[in-house]
Image (spheres, rainbow, N blue to C red):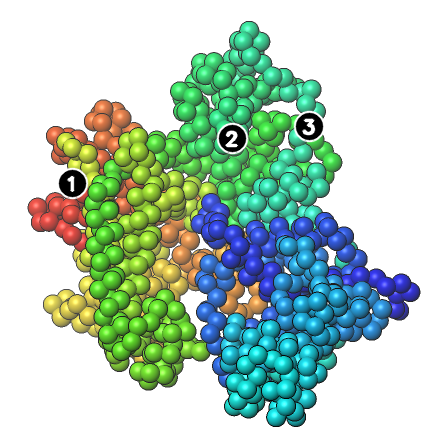
Amino acid sequence: MMPSERAKLYLIDGSGYIFRAFFALPQLNNSRGMPTNAIYGFIRMLFKLLKDARPEHIAIVFDSPKKTFRDDLFEDYKANRVEMPSDLSVQIPYIHRAVEACRLQLITLDGVEADDVIGTLAVRADKRKFDVIIVTADKDFMQLVSPGITLWDTMRDKRTGVREVRERFGVEPAALIDIMALMGDSIDNIKGVPGIGEKTAAALIRHFGSLDQLYAQLDQIEQAGIRGAKKFGALLLEHRAGAELARKLVSIETKVPLELEPEALIWPGIDEQAVAELLRELEFGSLLAELAPSQRSLPLGDSAAEQPVAGERLTAAVAELAQASRIALHLNHDETPAASKLKLHADGSEITYVVDAEEIPATSALLSGNSSKSCHDLKQHLHRLHEYGIRLADADFDSMLAGFLLNPGKPEPSLSDLYHQHLTPLGGGASAGSEPRVVAALREALLPKLEAAGLLALYRDIELPIAGLLAEMERTGIGIDAGALSNISSEFGAEMARLERECIDLAGHPFNLNSPLQLREILFTELKLPTKGLSKTKSGYSTDVDTLTRLASAHPLPQKLLDYRTLSKLKSTYADALQALIDFKDHRIHTCFNQALTATGRLSSSAPNLQNIPTRTEDGRRIRRAFVAPPGSILLSADYSQIELRVLAHLSGDSTLIEAFSGGEDIHARTACEILGIERDQVDAQARRIAKVINFGIIYGMGPQRLAGELGIALNAASDYIKRYFERLPGVRAWLDETLRTARECGYVTTMYGRRRYLPELNGPQGGSRAQAERIAINTPIQGSAADLMKVAMLRLDRMLREKQLGALMVLQVHDELLLEVEADQLDRVRDIAREAMEEAAALQVPLKVDLKWGSNWAEMTGESGQALNLPATSIV
């Protein structure tokens, strides 16, 4: 039924919103390193629109990734557009989730551009007596303007109707198609008539009435009173075909076969729960606060239960709290230190004491005393209290770590996440009280769940104590030679300039090395490099790393481009970025170790990420040379040898693997003998490489196709290698099968230490998600066990070093490697302790082995044989 009054329909140009948000905001990353600027800007614009317009009918339309009729009309349509930046493409799924959470109708039609879908809906709705508002900044939509259709640029609060079009162009909106046909559109690579801009095009159409009339009366153009008419007449004649093609390309289609009526686009309002969960996941606290009060970070309760204390009242409160067996605390972190507040709550009490920043030091005796403590995010509380000179002691409950172990699919859960998940439904009316009271309630709720899941020992014996050690490592930091980084940056810059000159020489003319469009033109049109098997998008062949690598054998330019890109990344990501992160007080870099981020339990590093510094090239190792020991000290690297393969041997009980590791054999050489059917003295570098790829490929669930690609061999040969591997190592095959069977049965896999990872996709339909879950099910018990074992080793080593009072500092952990800063005269003793602590960290069916090396910097180290080692510190050889 059509509405009796003119209702309003808002049609949002979603693709335009995305690009506007991405380019309007600076780079934003969340704590996991994922770019979020486009998501943030998009959601903020969407919230503003919904708040200002309060629409009854609304839809948001996105472009289809598939070819459209315009691509068929003109092969080079949009050809000069650069490929979507990877930092934007990873954000698109979250933007779609935001639209769905806001319960807006999301429309994408295969093979149809958003403009045409919007045009069809707008015209259809106008005929049904809707007032249509197209939310966009794109002037192309002006051709649709009518008394019932207007445009709204919400960012500038600029509205465009018939009057505004007439004032700007002097014609009716429908005539804009002909004006645009003459002008062309450089953004979409629509040529039009070269030399004719907006003013001239508008004047011509005003005078002649239409493009057809202009060409019918072209011999009269000099009488039109337009300056330069003779020149334009020649251009129009020469480019008539281009103008007529442009008219087809710029015309918005309004009769798309769309099975959707305007009346169906009713907006029921946002799904507050879904939006809140997404905003928490993305760490958009400010946006979360814009929702209804029930969606704020915590529904904090009666302020009367919170008592500010200072002076004598604080002294009395501290004395009272000291009698409690357990205290829950929460120290908020404010950008202005003076605004920080410490909240303290004794179990069973109705009162939460609130201490202002300047009074926090007075709680030192209480917080370093022997009463048990609970908090959320122990590591951060250790840091924050350390700033006040307070050593937090006997902290035996961290709600963040407990929540993460119970649900590792939700990294770094906030206090609000856990409150709504475990204490009350999201949006419920119950008051949470204060943050410490929530922590206390979570302790009562989560500890039984940890015990029921077999996670209590992992939580108590590994995760809680490692939080304290990681806090110390973060405060210690690692020495860095700022001068060396500066020199490296300059050298990389000079080398990049040389490579740029060489690339230009090879191309035969100047070009922008960072322009995919120009690279595509040079590689495939000018140099005519082979395109067989290359990936192709609607804008042309890709110029990514894989493509350039494949082309490197056909011409020297692709390899030069790869070298340039490698240096560019090293320079920007490390040589330049690390300089900006040096702490000027101690001339060290202080990374952050993320304990509750990866589902396998592996530690990750951020701000900066020191675990991904390249090591397999000399240029990458130059970065590591800038990490140095201070005068009088040495850097000691203790690296587990083939830890994941040793864990596989232990878990699978495979006799061949156990025999090889127990006998100190080269495991890759042994595997080569087994699967290639050769003797030990016949194992050459190529045979060992094949075995190594297979050994580690099995851990990550590599199939024949991936193996064939890695080794550059035929698919049937790769299948044969895998078949022989499992024939010769049947224990591994049996373990893999049993692991998958058990995981499907119970819905999760576990590590040696009981860590769980839930994989519901294992029982889903056949396809990519299930295959990925199967690979994760194989890898997690191995990688997760190795990660847990490393944490045990770190705790053992820290305890042994403290007992011996050797003054060695643990400064970095990179997966299987620990890096220590050791006083030079204590090196021998610390080496022995490191070996003992790490090799005896667990009793496996195979021995653990640690490779030790040391030096004045992280790249140039001497091994126990006395030979200088320039190999990457994390290499497995």
Left or right: 532, with 669 as reference point: right
**In 3D space, how far apart are the residues under numbered discs 2 and 3 (Cα atoms)?**
21 Å
Residue at x 42% of width, y 37% of height: 463
For the residue carrying disc 2, how many other residues have a C-alpha within 10 Å: few (<14), some (14-19), or many (20+)? few
Query: What amino acid type should be assigned to the residue bearing mark 1?
Result: Ser
Label 2–label 3 contact, CB within 8 A: no
Q: Is residue 91 above or below residue 145?
A: above
**What residue is disc 2 on?**
334
The residue shown at (31%, 82%) is: 527
Q: Label 3 vs label 1: CA separation?
A: 56 Å
The residue under label 3 is 301
Amino acid type shown at disc 3: Gly
Choose mark 1 or mark 2, whichever is in front. 2
Q: Position of residue 180 (x, y in %)?
A: 61, 77
Whether residue 859 is situated above or below residue 775 in the rendered picture: above
Disc 2 versus disc 3: nearer the observer: 2
* Residue at point 66%, 42% (across, down): 290
Question: Which numbered disc covers residue 460?
Answer: none
Among the two numbered marks 2 and 3 on one chain, the one whose residue lies closer to the N terminus: 3
Mark 2: secondary structure: loop
